[in-house]
Image (cartoon, rainbow, N blue to C red):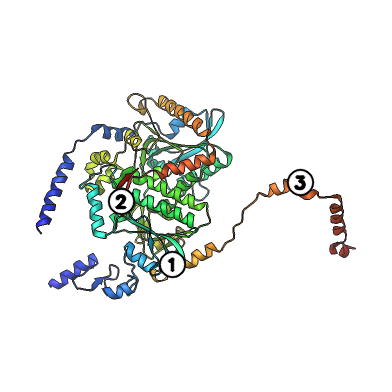
Amino acid sequence: MHLKDEVAKISQRLRELSRGRHLDKAVWEKVELARHPKRPYTLDYIEHMFAGFTELRGDRCYGDDPAIVSGLAAYHGRTLMVIGHQKGRDLAARTRRNFGMARPEGYRKAQRLMRMADKFGIPVLTLIDTPGAYPGAAAEDRGQAGAISGSLMCMARLSVPTVAVIIGEGGSGGALALALADRVLMMENSIYSVISPESCAALLWKDSTEAHLAAQTLRMTSSELFELGIIDEVLPEPRGGAHRDHSAAARILKDALEDKLRELDEINPQVRKKERSEKFRQMGVWRENGLTLF
Amino acid sequence: MAQQVSVDISRRNGSTDLPGAESCPSCKQLLDVGELEANLKVCYHCGHHFRLNASERIGQLVDAGTWNEMAGNLRSADPLEFFDLRPYPERIEEAEFATGFSEAIRVGTARINKMDVILAVMDFSFMGGSMGSVVGEMFWRATEEAVKTRYPLVVVCASGGARMQEGILSLMQMAKTTCAVDMLGETPVPFVTVLTNPTTGGVMASFATLADVIISEPGALLCFSGPRIIEQTLKEKLPEDFGLAESNLDHGQIDMIVARPDLKSRLVQILGMLEGGVACALQPLWEEEARPARRRGTFTQALGRIKAIANSPWRAFKR
């Protein structure tokens, strides 16, 4: 009984400490920038980056998901398969694009087109910008989990070079489904996380107003993820953020893409696949026989 | 009166004040603990499957004395120095204390009805069976062992998803385990998952649904987004059977539902049948045809071939 009181007292003190912790405003600013309504979306990047784009639609099973756009892009005399989440600019478009939350047919469309790219030796570029996969009963019935795992497996198996760029929100499994790539890049003011800060706050702090604290604790900004070794490069945005100048942001992305593709083209496809698998294998931290392993 | 109140509470919690008794959360009947254990923790009134921890599962599934645990000394680190209402290491310690295990997964080699397998069992009682770095690494080692030994891989899943306290690293375990399954997929080693209540989130959206054959226990909740999340975020009213194994079976997401008493025999049957195939290395047909040397042969051979055709019974019939 005595011990119980003591424990209660200490945990109360800890709670106070955790609330009083220094809140870094810059982190929340990044979250807001990542969700900025004027931020360039996948189709904006496509428009500025490529001379031509042919959209290919449908998963050949159930339907076409407007939350994911995909197709062939003309790029420096070669072809590129571009697949990305798409949010809408106005209310009607937002509803049609389902706020960038993809359903199973979106991930199955992505799989179909990645396989096609593999067949023709076309490199794959994915642009990630989603709050998460759509959490709806109908999506579950159509196998949301299996569609995401299928997309992950498809990306793990590709023999062509793959580059993933997080351009806005990288929300949980719905984002990762398109991000198992040889090179994963992040725009400076984008976020990538296992859960949204709001949901995390509700889940762990039992209080959704603690989202700012959750965002900071989760480490979801590009620089922090680079330090953790999750992403390969942070792409600097135009002054004030990508929403200030879409074409400049697209130019930065295009230069980085060229760089990464040149690098990946040099590598033997089998080695490339092995390196990809090895890269994701290394992700994790644990203690073994008293040693902390990274 | 007092007794009635206590029974009411017990019905909600699934435990009673009565020694040696437990109430079934499904049919509310009082059950004898001894009998319940003997019935593999399946309610003998309504067939409700109680949750098993990893030890109980291993005890039920493998032949006595054949469990050989590997790499049991991995522990979670705290790379993000995660601190919500309590620090992450404290939560781990508490889970270790409460369950007696070091993580939410146990991996080992075992025999099921005399068949050698690599078995991984997840434990929902350890931080909701959540997948962090250790679970991902243990899964990787299990697949590696399966590739090396060529023993089938059986994974019993029970998980609420990714471990929030490891942030992005826990998300990356989905990618890591997928790469592991891909590695396993290059060999003809069977991979079967047994989904138990509940299997959701990141585990469901990675290795759990990547198996060759997916089995589920009756009444298990299997989904990517849990019912609470859907109801909260979309204010959508969900049907009663949402996400249950039976509904998943109807929608073609799993292969079969197997009740606990039949699990051992069905597993062995499936694994045995999968291993019964004969490897067929496919050679592209056009390569065969493009090789002219095979057809050419000597002049006499060609003459013989023509003669054989000329003397074939079909010719005789025609004449």
Residue A101 in view in this figure: no
Q: Nearer the viewer, mark 2 or mark 3?
A: 2
- The answer to whether marks 1 and 2 mark residues whose Cβ atoms lie closer than 8 Å is no
Residue A123 placement (x, y as % from top left): 52, 36
Residue at the (10%, 54%) spot, across then down: A5
Residue A124 placement (x, y as % from top left): 50, 37
Q: Earlier in the sequence, mark 2 or mark 3?
A: 2
Is B91 positioned to the left or the right of A111 in the image?
Answer: left
- The crowding category of the residue bearing disc 3, from other C-alpha atoms within 10 Å (few below 14, some 14 to 19, many at least 20), is few
The residue at which mark 2 appears reads as B75
The residue at which mark 1 appears reads as B112
Residue B119 placement (x, y as % from top left): 41, 60
Q: Quadrant of residue A45?
A: top left
Is A16 positioned to the left or the right of B125 in the image?
Answer: left
Q: Secondary structure at mark 1?
A: strand
Q: CA distance from mark 1 to mark 2?
A: 28 Å
Give above or below for A174 relative to B220: above
Q: Chain of mark 3?
A: B
The residue at which mark 3 appears reads as B292
What's the amino acid at mark 3?
Answer: Pro
Q: Earlier in the sequence, mark 1 or mark 2?
A: 2
What's the amino acid at mark 2?
Answer: Arg
